[in-house]
């Protein structure tokens, strides 16, 4: 029974890791497009005195999209900022308990971000809100925010399961 739950968890983790990498590659593609747009805008502005209309607005959107799509990968790769001065000084079991509580709180906050992103997206869809310069609808960005936050929630869930497992392994090692 335990082997099957480990197999299930491994398959779940592998699928989530794949989704996170797809989101990362999409975000990286947006950065390349953003760099090209910015380069063309600068060339047009300084050499031809004809900037691309709405280029700054588009760059802001693209930067936000990159950030949203990269959140889960940042957590997955451990690249987020983590202060461990206190937890390194604590006994391993207590450090695991604190880590688990922190992950639960983080999961709750990101789950709220998912919920409010969906609610705001629906409100913006019905209101028909668009950007000032280019008239781009805002609601897709809210849904994209929710999608990126869902991936982060799934990554936090994986971390939570690993933390709880580590707690019981630490407990068994101490006995």
Image: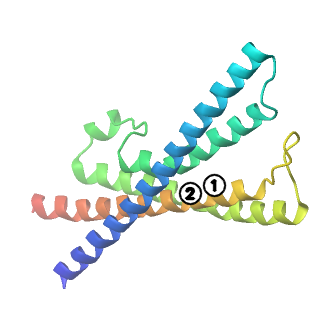
Bin the neighbour count of mark 2 within 10 Å (Cα to Cα): few under 14, some 14-19, many 20 and up: many
In the depicted structure, whether residue 70 falls above or below residue 38: below
In the depicted structure, whether residue 170 falls above or below residue 68: below
Q: In the displayed structure, does residue 17 sit left or right of residue 1?
A: right
Residue drawn at x 78%, y 53% is: 138
Residue drawn at x 61%, y 36% is: 34
Residues 152 and 147: in front is 147
Residue farthest to the bottom, as pictured = 1
Residues 129 and 3: in front is 129
Q: Please, what secondary structure does the residue beneath circle 1 have?
A: helix
Quadrant in the picture for residue 140 = bottom right
In the depicted structure, whether residue 55 falls above or below residue 115: above
Q: In the displayed structure, does residue 68 sit left or right of residue 141?
A: left
Residue drawn at x 66%, y 65% is: 115
Which residue is denoted by mark 1 in the rendering?
Answer: 145
Q: In the displayed structure, does residue 27 sit left or right of residue 59?
A: left
Q: In the displayed structure, does residue 175 sit left or right of residue 42?
A: left
Alpha carbon distance from label 1 to label 2: 6 Å
Quadrant in the picture for residue 101 = bottom left
Marks 1 and 2: CB-CB under 8 Å? yes
- The quarter of the rendered structure image containing the N terminus is bottom left
Q: Position of residue 3 (x, y in %)?
A: 17, 79
Q: Position of residue 161 (x, y in %)?
A: 33, 65
Residue farthest to the front, as pictured = 48
Q: Position of residue 31 (x, y in %)?
A: 55, 38
Which residue is denoted by mark 2 in the rendering?
Answer: 149
Residue drawn at x 46%, y 49% is: 25
Numbered circle sitting on residue 159: none
- The quarter of the rendered structure image containing the C terminus is bottom left
């Amino acid at each position: 029974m335990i082997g099957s739950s480990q197999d299930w968890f491994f398959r779940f983790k592998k699928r989530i890791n794949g989704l996170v990498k797809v989101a990362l590659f999409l975000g990286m593609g947006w950065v390349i497009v953003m760099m090209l747009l910015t380069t063309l805008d600068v060339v047009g502005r300084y050499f031809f005195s004809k900037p691309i209309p709405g280029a700054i607005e588009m760059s802001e959107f693209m930067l936000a999209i990159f950030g949203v799509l990269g959140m889960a990968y940042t957590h997955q790769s451990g690249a987020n900022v983590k202060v461990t001065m206190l937890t390194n000084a604590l006994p391993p079991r207590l450090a695991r308990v604190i880590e688990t509580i922190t992950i639960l709180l983080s999961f709750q906050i990101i789950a709220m971000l998912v919920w409010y992103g969906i609610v705001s997206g629906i409100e913006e869809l019905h209101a028909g809100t668009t950007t000032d310069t280019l008239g781009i609808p805002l609601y897709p960005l809210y849904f994209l925010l929710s999608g990126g936050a869902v991936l982060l929630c799934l990554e936090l869930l994986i971390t939570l399961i690993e933390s709880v497992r580590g707690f019981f392994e630490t407990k068994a090692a101490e006995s």
